[in-house]
Image (cartoon, helix red, strand yellow):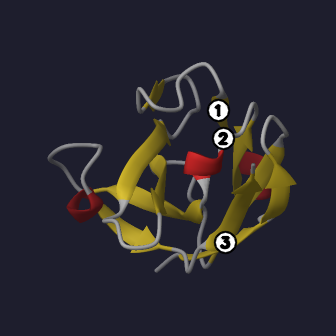
Amino acid sequence: QVQLVESGGGLVQAGGSLRVSCAASGRTFSGYTMAWFRQAPGKSREFVATISGSGSSTTYADSVKGRFTVSRHNAKNTGYLQMNSLKPEDTAVYSCAARFKGGSYASTEAYAYWGQGTQVTVSS
């Protein structure tokens, strides 16, 4: 079993930057693919980015490509999402997920473990 806890959310002005973290405990997650999803008010959860267990492979949603960077530090059992050039439409609860079970990497059904999420609010 793996527990995931996000941190680092907050309020930032449009154009600003923020880094959210995902700390894993329970057992090492270095072998697990990790992903970030977000859910805005009144909308379904959407895929943001994913990173392989080694960190060598990453994939991004078109809406964040070139602005967001996903990374991980396996020795610290922590994943990160660096968000630059933030826009008001990036406002959402950001959640991390781990352990890819198969299917589409962009599907919420594909991951075994989830954190509770951290709120990111971008003001215009």
User: Which residue is label 3 attached to?
Assistant: 118
The disc, 3 or 1, on the residue closer to the chain's N-terminal end is: 1
- Look at discs 1 and 2 and give the one toward the viewer: 2
Q: How far apart are marks 3 and 2 (CA)?
A: 17 Å
The answer to whether residue 78 is seen in the rendering is yes
**SS category of the residue bearing label 2:** loop
Within 10 Å of the Cα at label 3, are there few (<14), some (14-19), or many (20+) other Cα atoms?
A: many
Please tell me which of labels 3 and 2 falls first in the chain. 2
In the rendered view, does 123 fall on the left or right side of 39?
right
**In the shown orientation, is residue 38 left or right of residue 14?**
left
Q: What element carries label 1?
A: strand
- Which residue is tagged 2? 87
Disc 3 and disc 1: Cα gap in Å? 16 Å
| Residue 23 seen in the figure | no
Measured as percent of width and height from the top left, residue 18 is found at 82, 48
Residue 95 percent location from the top left of the image: 54, 65
* Occupied quadrant, residue 28: bottom right
Of marks 1 and 2, which one's residue comes earlier in the chain? 1
Q: Tell me if label 3 and label 2 are in contact, CB under 8 Å.
A: no
At 69% from the left and 62% from the top, the residue drawn is 120
Q: What amino acid does circle 3 point to?
A: Thr
Give residue 40's position: percent from left, percent from top: 47, 65
In the image, residue 82 lies at what x, y percent? Answer: 74, 40
